[in-house]
Amino acid sequence: MTLSPEERPDIVLIGAGVMSASFAALIRSLDPSLTLSVYETLDSCARESSEAWNNAGTGHAAYCELNYTTRRKDGSIDIAKALDVNTEFDLSRQLWAHLVEKNWIEDPSAFIRNCPHMSFVRGAENVAFLRARYEAMVKHHCFDTMSYTEDPAKIAEWAPLMMGRRASGEKLAATRVTEGTDVDFGTLTRLLFSKLKQKQGVALHYCHKVTALSREPGGRWRVTTVNTSTGETKSVSAGFVFVGAGGAALDLLKRADLPEAHGYAGFPVSGLFLHADNLDLCQRHTAKVYGKAAVGSPPMSVPHLDTRVIRGRPYLLFGPYAGFTTKFLKSGKWTDLPRSITRDNIKAMFDVMVDNRDLVRYLVGQVMQKQSARFAALQEFYPAAREHDWNVAVAGQRVQIIKTEKGRGTLKFGTEVLCAQDHSLAAVLGASPGASIAASVALQVVTKNFAHRLPEWREKLKTIIPSYGLDLRQDAEACRAIREKTGKVLGV
């Protein structure tokens, strides 16, 4: 019996977030004949980490995030990670610009806007660090538009809310890059899936939970789902599986018994934001301002006071305040973490708990923190803040990667693409910079798992991603030209 394309899709995507949307948009741009089936447990796309309220909305380009630059033992600043993140965001800009030009996205201002990116520090030691960071970065063409100041009046010009009622004589410094962006990843995801569902050969299945992944003879994957509304169970045969399911990815890989995923575990981190919707406040602060992370805190807990535009409406957000929960998804279960423990990852998890006791104590302290303490943290950024202007928003879950390296479990901060050895499956694990590098993730999946098709796709890839085959960290002329073009197309 011959199976229909719906029963035998070329590609199954698990999870309807920005990672799946980006990979689907790229792969269908390369080959419009490929059939795709998307399965999402919830009743619509972008409900977990891609939803604007569940992430920072920063187009992470390493302009302002101090955790991407570290001081070496000799005192110099290492900007390698910042360069990686910066040029990975360029890939996202290129993909988005292409999709605008091809009418996948009618109005880019629906999801992306110009928003200056700033770093702000207090105290002599932090000022010395920021000055050294600026001096190291501004020499490179990727960061040569960065400005630096220790002048309170200039900082007040850049971020007036932050300087009102601030004590005089305090040692301060700030950097600013005016071409930073604010990105509503939820709206972007909805725009892409809205376009995808109009295309022949693409099927979206909401309220469908993937319950099993198993190998078929010949190398295909049997994907079994249950309709959470009706209880109906069905399965399809997939040629390739993309797992973009956020915190659920590890559980799915365990179900698939993927050898490459053995030993992996997850470390969930939750978060809260304070948000203000007072339009006067929102209009008086138009920047994303990142500070220095507290000692022992995870990288995604770097405090920042942000301009946000969510579904067209401006807000101010401050946070995040990190916490700990055993859920792997915001809509998950308290049993997610205990259920993820297996014989092959329990040692790695124990190693991480022992080696990161300061982090564990920090997270517990954040969970126990009172609202007054959260507001006091905001006042360090914005001394004139009034408590009644601010409300609490629960952010999305982040599941950090635990993996074994050199015989010991290690906690990894970042985003990783895990591929099956036979290139029949790819999964996205980890968190920050996450959504900002979705196009980079999609491109990795294509180049690693569809290598046999790269010769015929090469010219298309260069059209979609003009920097394909180039290194923008080295090629200053190409970097500037591509940024100028994508900026015009995206209106930033």
Image (cartoon, rainbow, N blue to C red):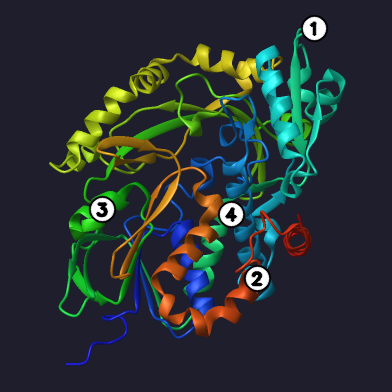
Question: Residue at the spot x=32%, y=85% of the render?
Answer: 5
| Label at residue 261 | 3
The percent coordinates of residue 155 (x first, y second) are 81, 25
Earlier-in-chain disc, 3 versus 4: 4
Earlier-in-chain disc, 2 versus 1: 2
> Could you give the CA–CA distance between mark 2 and mark 4, rounded to whole angstroms?
16 Å
> Could you give the CA–CA distance between mark 4 and mark 1, rounded to whole angstroms?
39 Å
- Which amino acid type is marked by label 4? Glu
Crowd band around label 2 with a 10 angstrom C-alpha radius: few (<14), some (14–19), many (20+): many
Crowd band around label 3 with a 10 angstrom C-alpha radius: few (<14), some (14–19), many (20+): some
Front of the two marks 2 and 3 = 3
- Which amino acid type is marked by label 3? Ala
- Which amino acid type is marked by label 1? Gly
Label 2 sits on a secondary structure element that is helix
Label 1 sits on a secondary structure element that is loop
Front of the two marks 4 and 1 = 4
Would you name the residue on which mark 4 appears?
88
Earlier-in-chain disc, 1 versus 3: 1
Residue 347 seen in the figure: yes
User: Furthest residue to the left?
Assistant: 343
Earlier-in-chain disc, 2 versus 3: 2
- In the picture shown, does residue 276 fall above or below 336? above
318 lies left or right of 342: right
| Label at residue 98 | 2
Would you name the residue on which mark 1 appears?
169
- Which amino acid type is marked by label 2? His
